[in-house]
Image (cartoon, rainbow, N blue to C red):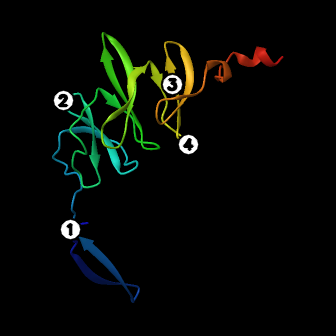
Amino acid sequence: MHSKRIFPVIFFLFGIPFHISAQQVKYLIPPTNNYTTVASFSEGLACVHFSYNSVGFLNTMGNQAFPNTYEDAGSFHCGRAWVRKTINGKTKFGFINNKGKLVIPYIYVEVEDFSCNRSSVNKEGVWAIINKDGKTIFGDSLLIIYSDDADHLFR
């Protein structure tokens, strides 16, 4: 991506030559930025928290991937990332695609990252599994949610 200057230096340790190379550092994201945190890259995008309390995404060139910003967001999995927005005083979650377009609306109170093209979502206390289009695959009646006090069910 960037050219690097290599300066070979030969040292001798106990009479055996070895090389140390120094390189000029080129930053993808310069240390003089307005980010409070930068997450790991996932699917070519990194979630960044801006110092002005919003979240966006950087591409592998270190540029903002799309102009949209969010209250909070997760990393991309299966081409989707969850995003959070406060609507009428209530926290809601939806999902965006890797172009920053909202593809699953802000209708959930809890969500999980996508895995195997599916996500667990909670809408008004009812859990479901959805696909990447937001269609319900499994409803609440087919789900078993882990609980610390579920041991009594198996006695």
Per the image, label 3 sits on a secondary structure element best described as strand
Q: Residues within 10 Å of mark 3 (few under 14, many from 20)?
A: many
Q: Work out whether residue 134 or residue 37 is closer to the camera in this orientation and state it.
A: 134
* Callout 1 amino acid: Gln
Q: Is residue 63 above or below residue 155?
A: below
Q: Nearer the viewer, residue 48 or 139?
A: 139
Indicate the position of residue 118 as horizontal and vertical percent values: 54, 36
> Which residue lies under the disc numbered 3?
121
Which residue is label 2 attached to?
52
Disc 1 is placed on an element classified as loop
Mark sitting earlier along the chain (2/1): 1
Q: Do the residues labelled 3 and 1 touch (CB within 8 Å)?
A: no
Q: Earlier in the sequence, mark 3 or mark 1?
A: 1
Q: Judge the density around disc 1: few (<14), some (14-19), many (≥20) Cα neighbours within 10 Å.
A: few
Q: In the image, what residue occupies the spot 21% across and 62% down?
A: 26
Q: Looking at the image, is mark 1 or mark 4 nearer the viewer?
A: 4
Rounded to the nearest whole Å, what is the CA distance between mark 1 and mark 4? 41 Å
The percent position of residue 23, horizontal first and vertical second, equals 24, 70
Of badges 2 and 3, nearer the viewer stands 3
Amino acid at circle 2 = Tyr
Picture coordinates of residue 70, whole percent (x, y): 28, 29
Q: What residue type is labelled 3?
A: Val
Q: Residue 116 carries which label?
A: 4
For the point 48% across and 35% down, which residue is it?
A: 113
Separation of residues labelled 4 and 2 (CA atoms): 34 Å
Q: Give the residue at mark 1.
A: 24
